[in-house]
Amino acid sequence: MCLLCNKVLGNDAMKPSKLQDHLRRCHPDKTDKDLKYFQTLKDKLQKRPTLDRMFASTSQRNDDGLRASYNISLLIAKSGKPHTIGEKLILPAVEEVLKTVATYSKIRKTAYYRREDYFIEKAIPLSNIISVATDGAPAMVGRYRGFISYLKQNVPGVLAVHCVIHRQHLVAKNLSVRLHESLQLVIDALQGDSLNLIKTKSILSAFLARVKLMKQNIGRGEFSQFPNLSQTNCQEDDVSTYVQHLNALYSDFETRFEDVLTMVIPPWIINPYGDLEETNVIIQEELTELGTNEELKVQFKNGYQQFWLQNNIPVTYPVLWNIAWKFLISFPSST
């Protein structure tokens, strides 16, 4: 069969000379095409849908649907429920699940593309995005269809952070009203334009240290940190309850913020002019060069964050910058 006009040729017409004659007479505009062109036409022809393939696909779908129907019927029979529950409850439930999953998938894509359109409208390159904070919901952090997965297709090196304030709200769900109010002080401290991962770790570590100290003091009957408790006659059972509550708070907080609390911050980021021990030779070279730069040393008095965010740092000290920016620019809060 001719790949160009789909004319069925006889066996005698399959001789090379007659095929060339057919090409010159019927398709003169294609005589200069190379072999790759005709191989592409052959591949397209082989991949086009045919009746056999269509019926085979339909048959497979029907078999899968029939198998699912039998499996559901078996589950109903094992449960001892009437078979009418399949039409009244199971089928509507399955329909709702499929509809909801499809809708959420569409929402995730829409959320990403809306933000992408905004960046395009404002002429902001997507490559400028280096960090993003989310609430940790599956629609945001899903591995295959989450917002972050779509973003990483265009910005592979973006750093995704779970909003620290959202994590604290999750911890607060298990607290009493009084402890919830105390935790609000930490939440307030974690809000602000100058927040970075270094400051976040310091605030969280300080809070956990205070909780641990309170737990130890209450356990041995020392209530000086709790004026109201010091004026009451606390029973041993009451003290035990308070200690258990603080233990639960400490454990929950430590688990939810493990990534931040165990984060290793290179000392030279906070003070590049101190006595530092660095094993990486390339980092040593740039730190040595930076340490002798008197002009930059003057700028350090404004704080380490302003120091590293100077325009010439990424160009002059690229190795140091590639390490430091993740700790300085990241915004661990989505509020």
Image (tube, rainbow, N blue to C red):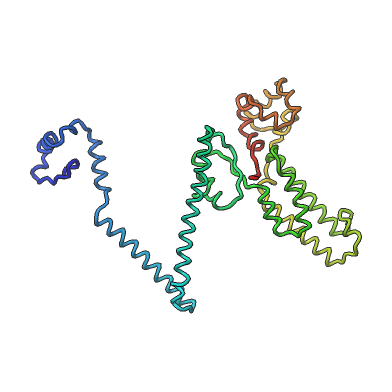
Q: How many labels does the image show?
A: 0
Residue 278, by quadrant, is top right
| Residue at horizontal 46 percent and vertical 55 percent from the top | 102
Picture quarter with the N terminus = top left
Q: Residue 165, how many percent across, how many down?
A: 68, 48
Image position of 277 (left or right of 110): right
Between 188 and 242, the one lying in front of the other is: 188
Residue 95, by quadrant, is bottom left
Between 107 and 269, the one lying in front of the other is: 107
Q: Above or below — where is 232 with respect to 272? A: below
Q: Residue 294, how many percent across, how many down?
A: 72, 20
| Residue at horizontal 44 percent and vertical 68 percent from the top | 91
Q: Residue 178, how many percent across, how many down?
A: 79, 57
Picture quarter with the C terminus = top right
| Residue at horizontal 34 percent and vertical 65 percent from the top | 63
Between 305 and 104, the one lying in front of the other is: 104
The residue sitting at the front extreme is 121
